C-alpha cells in the first residue's frame, strides 16, 4: 500500500477517534449501560409470572407445558458483548453531502464502540454484503477498537446484491451468548422477518438505518442516467416531470413503510440517521427513549 494511502487511513482513523470520543463524552456518558441494562445477561432460572413482569420475558415453552405463565430470570454479567453488523455493499457509497452513507455508518459505529470501550465491554465487528465479508470476534482494549475502526474505513464496498439474512445467520452461529447487536445498513435490501426474529430471540438487536435526503426527494436536474451500485443496472430518467419525481418519492416511502412494519413485527428498536443531519440529536433521543422504557 502506498505511503500516502497509509497516511490518509491514519488521518481518517484519527478524525473518527476524535469525533467519537467527543460524542461519547458529551452525549452518552452515563446512558450507555442503563440503556442496555439487562442485555448483558446470563440465564438464571424460571419463575411464575407476576404482575409488572415484562411480557417478552415469558418462557413460552414452560408456559405451554404447565398451563401457567412463567418468565425467565437473568443474572447480570460483569461485562457486555456488543457486536456491530455493518453493511458494506456498494449502495453505501452514495452521498449527496459531505459524507456518504457508508462513512456515516462507520462513524456511528465508532461512537458506539467508544461507549463500549469506556464501559470495559467487548466489541466485535461483522462486515457483510452479498455474504459475510469479514468477522472480528469481540475483544476488549483500545488496540482492538482502533483496528475495528480501521477495518470499517478501509474495506472495499462490494458491488453485489446485499443479503443481510446470511450475516444474521452467521452471527447466530458464532455468537452463542446473548449480546447487544447493532445492525447498521441503508436497508435498501430488507432482511426477512424470520432472520430478524431469530436474532431478536437470541440477542438485543438494534437497527441503525442510514439514509440520504436525495433518496427521499429527487430534485429537478433534467435528463439523467442512474446506475444501481450493486447490480450495475442502468436506468434513464427525465426528472423535469413532477410525475417522475413523485414516483421516485412514492417508491422510497413504500420501502420505508415496509422497513418500519418489518422491524415492529420483529420487536426491534430502530435508530434513524441521515447523512445531512448531525446524528447527536438522534442518538440522544434514541438513548433517552430506551432508558425511559426500561424504567
Image: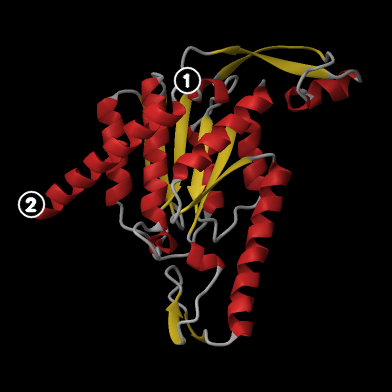
**Residue bearing the label numbered 1:** 30
- How has the structure been colored for display? secondary structure
Lower sequence index among marks 2 and 1:
2
Give the residue at x 36% y 52%. 103
Residue at far left of view: 3
Q: Nearer the viewer, residue 278 or 266?
A: 278
Q: Residue at x 83, y 13 (%)?
A: 50
Q: Is residue 123 visible?
A: no
Secondary element type, mark 1: loop
Q: Quadrant of residue 25?
A: top left
Q: Is residue 7 left or right of residue 146?
A: left
Q: Residues within 10 Å of mark 1 (few under 14, many from 20)?
A: few
Residue 119 can be seen, yes or no: yes
Please state the horizontal and vertical placement of residue 64, each as a whole percent of the image: 86, 25
Furthest-right residue in view? 67
Camera-side residue: 158 or 106?
106
Q: Residue at x 33, y 32 (%)?
A: 22
Which of the two marks, 2 or 1, is nearer to us in this view? 1
Q: Position of residue 28 (x, y in %)?
A: 45, 28
| Residue 73, quarter of the rendered image | top right
Q: With 146 as the anchor, is 292 left or right in this view?
A: right
* Disc 2 element: helix
Question: Residue 89: percent from the left, percent from the top?
Answer: 42, 59
Residue at 56% from the left image edge and 50% from the top image edge: 165
The residue lying toward the viewer, choosing from 228 and 68, is 228
Q: Position of residue 57 (x, y in %)?
A: 73, 23
- Number of other residues with Cα within 10 Å of mark 2, as a class: few under 14, some 14 to 19, many 20 or more: few
Pick the quarter of the image with the C terminus: top right
Which numbered circle lies on residue 3? 2
* Dot 2 and dot 1 residues touching (CB under 8 Å): no
Residue 128 vertical placement versus 147 (above, below): below
The residue nearer to you, when weighing 277 against 153, is: 277
Amino acid at each position: 500500500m502506498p505511503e500516502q494511502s497509509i497516511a490518509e487511513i491514519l488521518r481518517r482513523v484519527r478524525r473518527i477517534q476524535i469525533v467519537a470520543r467527543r460524542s461519547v463524552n458529551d452525549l452518552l456518558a452515563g446512558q450507555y449501560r442503563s440503556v442496555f441494562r439487562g442485555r448483558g445477561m446470563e440465564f438464571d432460572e424460571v419463575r411464575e409470572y407476576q404482575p409488572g413482569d415484562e411480557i417478552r420475558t415469558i418462557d413460552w415453552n414452560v408456559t405451554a407445558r404447565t398451563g401457567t405463565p412463567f418468565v425467565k430470570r437473568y443474572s447480570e454479567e460483569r461485562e457486555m458483548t456488543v457486536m456491530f453488523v455493518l453493511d458494506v455493499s456498494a449502495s453505501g457509497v452514495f452521498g449527496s453531502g459531505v459524507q456518504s452513507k457508508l462513512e456515516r455508518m462507520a462513524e456511528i459505529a465508532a461512537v458506539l464502540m467508544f461507549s463500549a470501550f469506556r464501559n470495559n465491554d467487548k466489541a466485535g465487528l461483522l462486515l457483510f454484503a452479498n455474504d459475510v465479508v469479514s468477522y472480528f470476534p469481540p475483544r476488549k482494549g483500545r488496540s482492538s477498537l482502533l483496528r475495528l475502526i480501521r477495518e470499517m474505513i478501509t474495506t472495499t464496498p462490494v458491488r453485489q446484491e446485499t443479503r443481510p439474512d446470511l450475516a444474521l445467520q452467521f452471527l447466530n452461529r458464532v455468537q452463542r451468548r446473548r449480546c447487544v447487536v447493532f445492525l447498521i445498513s441503508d436497508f435498501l435490501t430488507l432482511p426477512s422477518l424470520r432472520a430478524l426474529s431469530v436474532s431478536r430471540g437470541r440477542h438485543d438487536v438494534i437497527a441503525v438505518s442510514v439514509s440520504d435526503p436525495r433518496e427521499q426527494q429527487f430534485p429537478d436536474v433534467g435528463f439523467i442516467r442512474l446506475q444501481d451500485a450493486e447490480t450495475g443496472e442502468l436506468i434513464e430518467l427525465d426528472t423535469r416531470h413532477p410525475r417522475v419525481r413523485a414516483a421516485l418519492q412514492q417508491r422510497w416511502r413504500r420501502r420505508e413503510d415496509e422497513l418500519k412494519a418489518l422491524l415492529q413485527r420483529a420487536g426491534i428498536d430502530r435508530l434513524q440517521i441521515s447523512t445531512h443531519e448531525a446524528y447527536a440529536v438522534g442518538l440522544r433521543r434514541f438513548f433517552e427513549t430506551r432508558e425511559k422504557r426500561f424504567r
